[in-house]
Image (cartoon, rainbow, N blue to C red):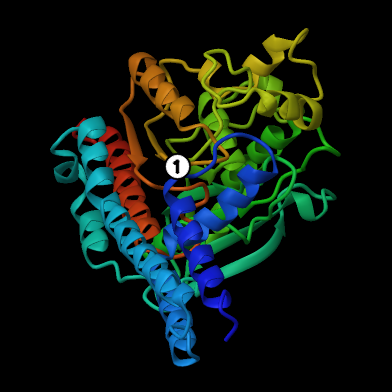
Amino acid sequence: MAPWTFFTLSLAGLLLTLNAYLAQRRTGPVVIISFMLGWLVSELPLHILFVQVAITLYCLLDGGLAHPQGFWALGLSILSWIGLLGLVSYSRKAAPILEASLSAGLGPDYQEKIAPDLKEKLERATPPPGLALNPFKLHRPDVIRHENIAYLPGGGKRNELDVYTPCAGVEGAPVLLQIHGGGWTIGNKHEQALPLMNHMAAQGWVCVAANYRLSPKNTFPDHLVDVKRAIGWIREKIADYGGNPDFIAVTGGSAGGHLTAMVALTANDPEYQPGFEEVDTQVQAAVPFYGVYDFANAFHLHPSDSIRGWVGKSVLKKDPKTELEDFRRASPLHRIAPEAPPFFIIHGSNDSLACVEEARHFAQSLTRVSDQPVAYGELPGTQHAFEVFHSIRSSAAVVAASRFLAWSLSREKAKKSPEN
């Protein structure tokens, strides 16, 4: 083995581990690279540890300690392994942190208010298959996906949705609408939140994942209009798949988190329902993950102001210097109202792409104004898109979201009970 090969590989491994702790949050190419590498290492530290140990053993067997550099390389590898084990510890903090956030937002006795039948389903929910060894094994054998259903005739692939239902069938089930992310410019309905949707469908929910028109070809609020059209389809058609249109919760990550919050905060607003103003687009609960909440950056919380320029150029197609009010109107932070539904806002402290300070501010502002409970869970050492595949942290988030949704559903059922 070349004298410096072992050292170079070990140094690269340590830098990968350090990046997971010290994520870059300024805009530009470095941020994208930091996110991509940090995302995988943060969520799969044991898998990365296995790979690094295997590489080190190979180097040692190939004479890696025959040169002084090899001893330095081994030391760097050990430091990286210690760091990776620390990331495992970070991941295991997610479950108690999210549970504490639910107790703080909904009340310490919130689990006691979950209906017995829903609580039983939560308690006997099985772990997702492939969690330990294959985090990308996302399909569940007890869930079926009905694909590529048009919710807007003639709208093409960007106006199609998928429906996830239990294989055994269901009737009168609550509905969860998932909105994919991708910076309002990319993304697809079958790529994100699969752990959550499959988990909820296995518990007897009907889950819907919808595409929507993308920028720069299309301009906001086209994205929001399409999501509301998908809600209209749910109102009209979801009973055919066993769903109950009287309870619709909405979730999504990143750009989908932004649209989740906008859907929840602009119910029945005719501005965003052109030609279908009479459709009820109110939702009963919202769970935005790592969303963007203020295009206007009104409180100067973004690490850089370039996101506002990019959104203005590609998504809104407006100039923030002269049309800042349009940026505010497109931002959940500036659409908060007392009639907002219950919210469970989840964000990572190391998010390179969506500002955690903004998520905190949104949660605090919503808590002050909303008549309904608001829970905010901030996860330490957590990158963007952390719940896209199975991991210790994503599983904790799925369990916490399912508890929030069960609580929200139980609350709605209690309101409609003859006793009340």
| Left or right of residue 59: residue 227 | right
Closer to the camera in the image, 339 or 97: 97
| Left or right of residue 306: residue 335 | left
| Vertical order, 94 against 372 (above or below) | below
**Mark 1 packing: few (<14 Cα in 10 Å), some, or many (20+)?**
many
What residue is pinned by disc 1? Answer: 350
| Vertical order, 398 against 294 (above or below) | below
Q: Which residue is located at x 34 percent, y 57 percent? A: 87
| Left or right of residue 324: residue 15 | left
Q: Position of residue 39 (x, y in %)?
A: 51, 55
Q: Position of residue 322 (x, y in %)?
A: 78, 7
Closer to the camera in the image, 375 or 338: 375
Closer to the camera in the image, 51 or 279: 51
| Left or right of residue 420: residue 268 | right
Q: Position of residue 60 (x, y in %)?
A: 44, 86
Q: Position of residue 180 (x, y in %)?
A: 61, 49
Q: Which residue is located at x 45 percent, y 71 percent? A: 73
Residue 78 seen in this snapshot = yes
| Vertical order, 117 against 323 (above or below) | below
